[in-house]
Amino acid sequence: MTFKFQYQDVVRRPNPMSNINPLARSSGKQATYGDRVEQLENSNLWQKSVRAHEAAGRTFDVSLIPQIAKVPLGEIIIDEDIQRGLEVKHCSNTIGGAKFDPRYLSTLICAKSPTTGKYISIDGQQSGSTVASMVHAGLFNTDDWKTLEYPVQYVVTDDLSFARKAFGIVNGKGKLKQSLFNELRNSIFCIRIDGNTEDPDDVQALRKVEIGEKHDCYPVEINSKLTKYPGTFTHISLFNLATEEALESAFSWHNEYFHMDGVHASVFPLFRDIIRDFKSAKIEFTDKLARELAAMIQSLFGDMTEFGQAAMAARTAWHNARYGYEGNWSDDQYAAVLFQLYVKLGGEENVPLVLMDKYFDPKSNTGIPDFLASEILDLAEAA
Amino acid sequence: MYFYIIKNSTDLGFGITGNYVNRAQDYVSHSGPNSGAHFAQLWTGHTPHVKKLERIVKEQWIDRTFISQDGWKTEWLQDNETVEQFTTDIENVVKERHLKVELYRSNYNFLLDK
């Protein structure tokens, strides 16, 4: 019997992303601080901050900007009330591990006492400890770690509360963290631009990115102007967690049926569950099933974004009805809603039973699709 | 659910609502009875499809909308947009994407309809 929904083709237009993919090549762009000053000056938000300083009569002394020096490691004190303890595993595996290169080391951040002249480390002790211990072990071409002059960035103060605050700042508070997209781009450019394939994590990241590119799907930065283009996605953490097999299926399916849209976050957990549960149950995820699911989503929801939102709302409603409270966020409802709805609406392809049992109450014979919005269920029944 | 094109004496915008009468009244309340605020076009349809239509405009056609220098995104269109062109493009995208959305009425004016 023919499934009640038929996928209707959507005109495929050339995707500009194939030419402007930010992971394909270096942008070749460089900027000066003059460019950045101009950019900030043109911002109302920036001007508001400047006006607030002016109104308060605040100006700043350039001599208070952190200074740099090379200080013998033996002269630096680690204040254990400010810095956390020594991370032996971090020093052994990360900084001093197999991939160690002295050029990866960071400078130490210190407070320099104006009265005693002593340097108190407020950040970077893991790097300092690793270097000192490597010198001690004879792994560096110098004999005495105590006299090794190490680069230090410091501020002059006896105020340890300031040092505590500075520690919070250098460890992330008030500082923009590297985005997951930037980390991914670094991995990809290490190979594509620098030709360095030594890091297996970079190699794996590239393989995943290439799976996406093969199917016209592209990771981009959150809030990037590129998110308006089809095939783009910003949920890099889900991409990183996905297996290559799941990505291959997810991107291929997206590009076949939803090539006109961005890749919605729900696609990643959905295909994680499809790959895992169909494989475990030794059931083939057929092309016919893939097309019928796409047809059902297209007709009832319009796209994966609307499906994802409807599935989340259904999970909340189901949880409330079954347990009396919303419950914690989970991403396993997408597959449950999709496949239970498919079977409920007469889909005949084989579906693993484990997907039918999730979010299903046999006593009342109700499952998660029963909690979709009535407008969706009415349209489904009427089709 | 409804998707509308809002037009006043100076600007053109868009949005979605479950109650177009109340929404039209809101526009008139905010901009005044002489602002000429009215719905130049009003489409209706299946809620997820109407929401998708709005998302296409807000995301894929973002270059056609007014964005402030600080990146504040609005549901108002750039000055060179016209009701005629925007209507044609909406109709085309509804057809291309097979959305269950259809034109409901044109030139709905809350003040004149009361």
Image (cartoon, coloured by chain):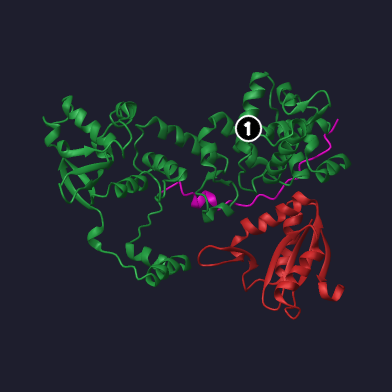
Chain colours: A green, B red
Q: Is residue B10 magenta?
A: no
Nearest to the observer: residue A201 or residue A370: A370
The residue sitting at 33% across, 35% down in the picture is A84
Q: Which residue is identified by label 1? A: A271
Q: How many marks?
A: 1
Tag 1 subunit: A
The residue sitting at 52% across, 50% down in the picture is A222
Left or right relative to A365: residue A335: left
Q: Is residue A6 magenta?
A: yes
Q: For the residue marked with disc 1, what is the amino acid? A: Phe
**Quadrant housing the C terminus of chain A:** top right
Q: Position of residue A49 (x, y in %)?
A: 42, 66
**Quadrant housing the N terminus of chain A:** top right
Nearest to the observer: residue A323 or residue A290: A323
Please state the extent of the stretch shown in magenta in the rendering. A1-25
State the image quarter where residue A310 is shown.
top right
